[in-house]
Amino acid sequence: MTKLVRVLPRVSMQAFLLVSVCITIFPFVWVAMMGTHSRSEIYSSPPPFYFGTRLLENYEKLLEVMPFWTVLGNSLLVSVLGTIVTVLFCSMCAYGFFAYEFRGKNIVFGVMVASMMVPPVLTLIPFFLTVKFLGILDTHFALWFPSAANAMGIFLVRQYMVTSVSRDLLDAAKVDGASDFRIYWSVVLPLIKPVLATLAIITFIALWNNFLMPLIVISSPEKYVLTLALRSLQSVANTPWGAVMLGTFMSMVPLLIAFLFFSKQMMAGLTAGAVKG
Amino acid sequence: MSITGSQIDGVAVATAPAARKRRSSTKFWKKKLMPWLFISPFIFLFLTFTLFPLLFSVYLSFQEWNPVAGLSSMQFVGVANYELALTDPWLWQSLYNTVWLAVVSGVPQHLLAIPVAYLLVTGLRGGLRHFYTAFMFIPYITSTVAVSLIFFSIYSANSGILNQMLLGLSDLPVFSWFFSWVPEAMPIRWLTSSDLLKPSIAMVVIWKYTGFNIVVYSAGFLTVSRDLYDAARVDGCNRWQQFWHVALPMIRPFIFFAVTLTIIGNLQLFEEPFVLTQGQSGGVAQAGLTASYYLYLVGWQWLEMGSAAAISWILFIFIAIATSVHFYFNGRKGLGEDR
């Protein structure tokens, strides 16, 4: 009896955690299963809670209603390009703020920190108009370029530089005759790899999952990214739900695989703002 | 390199002072400009895509303008846009929905995440803890659109798995006591009845972001040293008191930041309601129309950019008030006494 009392809290805790994990995972299992059923099977009652046999059919149907691989390529292009340029720009700017003392630095830095407080919703409409004026409406460029030197990223990298790059090292490099750009590129960048990886993860996921920007910027279907294309299937007449679920599942697979291998880094990276702040 | 350079300069001083001056002045300018060169991406992008749009949106909010008709169709209308927006019942409906959703989908996230994180940190070893938190974190990295599409099918009234599961539960021996009302209520229209739409949206938001908060709070509880718990135990604290009087005060800064993120995020909720209502004017009786959603409708469906700009400023003031209230009441304590 006493043993039971001692064991009970442990067991109930494990049970509680397992149930929460099940609730968390359920929609993913569900979408994987629905991707293998036809529309009529999905809408039968009770719905089938097992893997069906219509995977290929759904795949063909999916390609019929949307150019899945083109769209996936678009998403990949936007995310990869955006990530590379964001890491480059943010680290450059962070280095500028970190390594130099110059007139107006505090003002610019203050403005940058303040700009983090501006809710994106506020700039949405004028952002759209700016994009329109510049003639980059309906281009992928408008999806990744405007946020490539974002304040959050610069701030993150600069904070890391402050704690991990010593000023003596910069001075030593200068005495050795390294140019400004060389110090940045071959002395500082290798030292801050961890934060660059963090920034890359945050940026890639944000761009991959972004919906609002593509919704207002992209209008031609062949330039759609995954989120936009999947959402647009909702309004197709007689929505082929099996195919939509398959497409939804396939759109999540790349990040899920990445998460399988880098879960620690991704969790640390994505919560970095809250944890370090 | 630089040493030989200055030696050459030194030699040059004697022969041609003017030339030296010129060269050192280019050097001077190079030195001056170098930091600006490094921060130029930020300056350029900030001016083009943040500052200009911000200023322009102030200007725009006093104009009437349909973007399709071109720039020349812009007309000064004074505060008419603000008047129009403030008298539009949909705006108030959307603000009400936003606050409702922010509270109902925000509070449970933290009430769930804090105890779960505490259990994970105090009750489990590293490997197993990581296993659980990793699973709970997955919803956060998947796209909101994909998640909302999945829930759209789960919530389906006639054959959605949720309704079917409830029906199933009402057949089971013990559960039937609690679920006897289910067969009569079928089909439950999760997404097409004005009473249930908001709770359904809130469920998705809670499901998606609780894991994120668990990870944040786990990191918080990990900073609390074992010695503190031991000391508390020696002083006769039970587990509950250790949690309430030792652990919780220690993670205040984490709570503060997690709650700030939730407030800012939830007040801008857009994708979940948009996808769950199929993008059709906020669902039944505009029960799912959030402020961002309303903004989108005004700007892109009704093509009234001036009004939309005015609405975004109203929304901004709204968010600013909400966050400053939060900072005022919780900021000092949340940040600790030292700041």
Image (cartoon, rainbow, N blue to C red):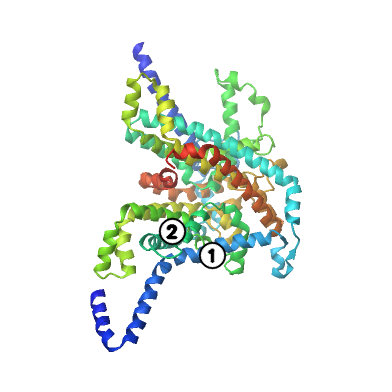
Q: Is residue A148 visible?
A: no
Q: Considering the numbered disc 1 on the image, is that residue within a helix, a strand or a loop?
A: helix
Q: Position of residue B176 (x, y in %)?
A: 58, 20
Left or right, residue A197 beside residue A52: left
Q: Residue at x 75, y 59 (%)?
A: B78
Using the image, tell me which numbered label, if any, was put on residue A234.
Answer: none
Q: Are marks 1 and 2 on the same chain?
A: no
Q: Position of residue B67 (x, y in %)?
A: 69, 64
Q: CA distance from mark 1 to mark 2?
A: 21 Å
Q: Quadrant of residue B193?
A: top right
Q: Nearer the viewer, residue A203 or A154?
A: A154
Task: Say the numbered circle drawn on residue A83.
Answer: 2
What residue would you read off at disc 1?
Answer: B47
Q: Position of residue A29 (x, y in %)?
A: 48, 39
**Chain label for disc 1:** B
Chain identity of mark 2: A
Amino acid at circle 1: Leu
Circle 1 packing at 10 Å, graded few (<14), some (14-19), many (20+), is: few
Q: Does residue A210 sit above or below B74 in this rendering?
A: above
Q: Secondary structure at mark 2?
A: helix
